[in-house]
Amino acid sequence: MINILIILLLPLFVPGLISRVKAIMVGRKGQSLLQPYYHFLKLLRKDEVISSSASFITRLAPSLALSATLCAALFVPIGLSESIFSFRGDVVLVLYLLALAKGIMVFAALDSGSSFEGMGASREISFTAFLEPAFILIMASLIFSAGFNSLNGLLHSYSIGGQGVWNIVVGAFTVFALYLMLLVESARVPFDDPNTHLELTMIHEVMILDYSGFSLGLIHYTAALKMLIYSSLIVQIIIPQTTSLPMLWFLGGIISTGIVTGILESLMARFRMNRNLELVLVPVSVAVLAIAALIAKSIGV
Amino acid sequence: MSIGFIILFLGLIPALWKRSGLFSIVWLMGSGFIAFEYLEVLYSRNVQDYLLLFPDPIGTANIGLNKLSAFFGVIFSIGLPLGMLYGHFYLKEHPGPGLRSHLFWLGLLGLSMHGLLWMRHSLLFLMLWEVMSISSFLCVIQDRSASLKAALNYIITMQIGAGFLIAGFGLLYLQTGSFDLSTLAAMPRLPMYLLMIGFAFKAGFVPFSSWLPQAHPVAPAHVSGIMSAMMIKAGLYGILVIISINSFNLREIAIFCLISVVTAFWGVIHAMISSNVKKALAFSSIENMGIIGIGLSVGLLGLDAGIPMMATLGFAGALLHTFFHSLFKALLFYLSGNILCASHTLEADQLGGLAKAMPRSAACFLIGTFAISALPIGNAFISEFSIYTGLLSAMAAHDLPAIVISVVLLAAMAFIGALALIAFAKLFGIIFLGEPRSEQATKARECPRGMCLPQVVLVAGILLTGIFGNVGLRFVKPLLRWMQLDMSGYIGLRNTFSQISIVLGIVLLVFGLLYLIRKLCVKDIVSPTWGCGYHKPSPRMQYTSLAFVHPLSYFLKPFILIKKERIKAEGLFAREVEYAEHSEDPFWKCIVEPVSKALNWFFGLFSGMHNGRTDAYIAWCVGFLIVVLVWVLGFK
Amino acid sequence: MFELIKARLRHGYQAIPNPLQAQINPAFPGCPFLAADADLPALAALCPTGAFSEKGLDLGKCTFCGACQRKYPEMIDFKPDFRLASDSREALYIAPGTQYQARFASPNTKLFQRSFALRNVSAGGCNACELELGASTNVNFDMGRYGIEIVASPRHADALILTGPISRSMAEALAETWKAIPAPKCLILCGCCAISGGVFAPSVQLDRSFLAHWPASIYIPGCPTHPLSIVHAIHSFMGAK
């Protein structure tokens, strides 16, 4: 129950936190921490303007993307308790539900017939080519060390603070790869710039250029939820296995992920667009390294 | 057996009368009867065998079914009549010459495919194999002017493949002394490899796949659909027969893995860069064969490494994918027929915005896209899920070679899956979304209801098997048991699939709810796409198919061939500047074309002999006789 | 990276604590006060934009050039007060002898109380108002603290903030942008050019028919408008506590 509440209420907090951190980093007062919620509620009450090029895809895409992401979130142990669903191999379902959300939004971007959005769609979907192997390899390395289990089981039975130095090494690799994936997937600074819509970046933000009102609200919520999913994965790997205050750890973890992202965003410039894709190979290679480390450990090098 | 086959044979009569409607109805009926037979074999134990007596070189022929051939039989008897039905409507909309012979060969193709499954005798098998190849060739060249070259390439490739099969079966006969395939327990290696290669030609494994992207774009839509969704499965059937009676060592499995991965990768990157709808679909068939191959190698690896769960999941995934591929690939090929009828072009860059003109076809294509790119709700997700979990389960078992191969396969599967998503997002997006890019596309109108009928049936099948994974799984269960695999893995998979059904149900429920809320509470105002204040947007400004995949095709440059055409700007006020890119098939460009050119050149050397003068010909004959005489006498 | 942190530490906290109550440089020519005995015809003869009429001074036409104050310092005095905006055109007239009061009726919708997205269209503007609009989002004025943001796509916007006198060639783009904003939406006129045409009012190159169809919700006088005026105007309109 508490999971569902967190999934429904917490996501929009993270972008608010990040922009607050960024505001503080540049010396502004900055918007309220709850600003994304106000924004979301306002958008839900607005009408929509639909492109005359749009087909049925534009109308159904945000709802489908949100429902797919929401169901993916049901498999992640968000909050203190177990995830709502779990079965062996559910990582694949999570991965593909997220891909479904992404795919349908790419269709929606192409639906407008705008060259900007085509560009954004092309870039967004190109990233999946390397993110999917990275995700599945990360999960494979977790399965290698914790046994074939559900995502929930894997995250609960694995922790950086576990046995020995190998666990720390592999855990650090995993967290690093997942964090890079978070930055890519939630369109954060070294890869994309959430503050620009039209200028140099044009990935996630440009894809939703033609959305307004209710649908835009759903899209913002979906993006925030996706970010929460990835931060929860990271946090669950870091949380010690036996702790008396899991909820506190969890919220602290989410907040510190947001703060780190905010600081990173204030201190870094975006990378060159046409080299971005090569950079997305980093999580893949880190995941391969993690598996290699595990294999080396198991055969006793 | 007899009733179904007799009805299907009778189908050839309306074909000769050019009654395509009656032809497809007969096929529907006949397939119903024959499917009943297959299901009986699949789900009950009494396997009927017939013994036929033939004159001497053939001898006693064993004819009958086993679980494997019954499984493929069910696939054929679902897919073929739908293809014939679609063919009826397609030929009405898009008439071509030679309807009579076309229908006749189509019927013969279907009959030979069914017949193939019953043959337990290698000579009869080869005969029907040839009938299948030749009749499909004759189906492809319905429109002779456009398709002859590609179809000739197809038939030549098939004959090379058949050559391998003949060699394989011949060696088998030499070593075992029997044409009977049903009693074989294990094969000697060399004939097995030859047979594998021969079947790989038909199934479209790299490097024997260059005929697929050539033949499919020129064939009529229903023939492409039948060939790509059903006929190449005959090759797969052969491979599965070999796999089911042999055991393999690790090195062979690794090679099989490698070929499968290369096949899938090769197929998907070319599907990604092809702008012709049918070419992209043909390449995607190669990719899907690769995925089935990966599934099979996962199964074999599981058997080899002693991980029963991995074996079950891998084989289950491969078989499920075989079944599902026949549904969604047929659907997409038939839809390409709709596109062709509506707009008279298959080039994606000439199309665009068809979703508004053809909403029914667009919705079907969307479901097909979900299925082919393995997104949930589509059915390929179910089969790939099974393969993925097989691989993941190997990660937990501590067997080093299995783990290393699994890691490679996992990464490859995920990469290929993502590329497939890109390929079909591109295809769907460029063709159906946005604004029409050409006049033909502007004029496109929805096809008649009849054309959509087989497609709706296929979409229903895809959704049923995609949401309720257990429907497909029940279908492969007898096969898994027949292959003597560990059934606890099956039970685990069944429970998982029922949970996936629940989750997908929730996805659809939430989606429906949100969609309804939006529909009821939100007012839509229609206004042109926001062009950032630019007043004269033109459809040419939209992204094209190669531009869409450019970030990745730039990355995959070493593996693909993109031809650039440009007219550079000259002078201060350049009149004409042009830039275009086309993708090409490297196999075709670098192997098939040079080889055929070399052959042409070589035989061209002798063209002077063919001068049309009788005395010269008599002279060649006399010369030949003299050479033979000298040779014979010399040896004496 | 460390350079950036060092710069941040050196600059410190730069935001104006409360832009609504901020003290402004006394030299700033802000809200004018018209003496009760002001000689309106004389002032009108002096004014380049014809801001003076028998109703008094029209803030919507005034360019704050100060020509009148220089000649008749006893009749008119521009005070350093940036609270100039109003929600109706009528309220922008200052009658002689009255104190101007920025007026905002209570908003008819609470929708924009906490979040307000603006899309700027510069319809033939001289780029002064646009710069000031940009400045109101910078570190000092930081309009974002009230939930006001400037967005790239009109689809994401709640209001169109218009700067410039609307030249003929921009009229179509303006109308298009307005159509692209989803309802409920409002129009903000920023600067004297946008409100009345300003110094360009007599020009035949203007096409201000757009404003006849769509009444504005906020009028922000100034030439150019001061960022504090903009922040104050929009914040007052949103009606947040």
Image: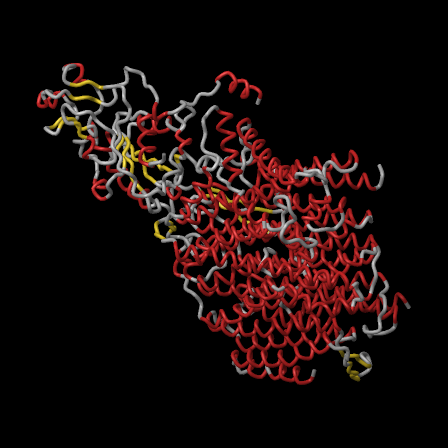
Above/below status of B46 relative to B438:
below
Question: x and y percent of residue A182 in the render?
Answer: 59, 39
Residue at 40% x, 22% y is: C16
Picture quadrant where residue A173 is located: top right
Quarter of the image where the C terminus of chain B is located = bottom right
Location of residue B535 in the rendering, given as x and y in whole percent from the top left corner: 33, 43
Horizontal and vertical percent for residue C152?
40, 38
Q: Is residue B439 above or below residue B616?
A: above
Q: Is C228 located above or below residue C213 in the figure?
A: above
Residue plotted at (49% across, 25% down): A26
Determine whether, in the image, residue C71 is placed left or right of residue B601. left
Which residue sits furthest front?
A244
In the rendered structure, the answer to whether residue A67 lies left or right of residue C237 reads right
Residue C50 in view here: no
Q: How is the image coloured?
A: secondary structure
Q: Quadrant of residue B132?
A: bottom right
Q: Nearer the viewer, residue B449 or C92?
A: C92
One can see residue A179 in this view: yes
| Quadrant that contains the N terminus of chain B | bottom right
Query: Along the horizontal axis of the image, is B405 left or right of B287?
Result: right
* The one of B273 and B57 positioned closer to us in this rendering: B273
Q: Quadrant of residue C100?
A: top left
| Nearer to the camera, B56 or B443 | B443
Q: Measuring 48% from the left and 65% from the top, which residue is drawn there?
A: B338
Q: Is residue C186 above or below residue B105?
A: above
Looking at the image, the residue that sits furthest to the right is B636
Along the line of sight, the residue nearer the viewer: B46 or B120: B46
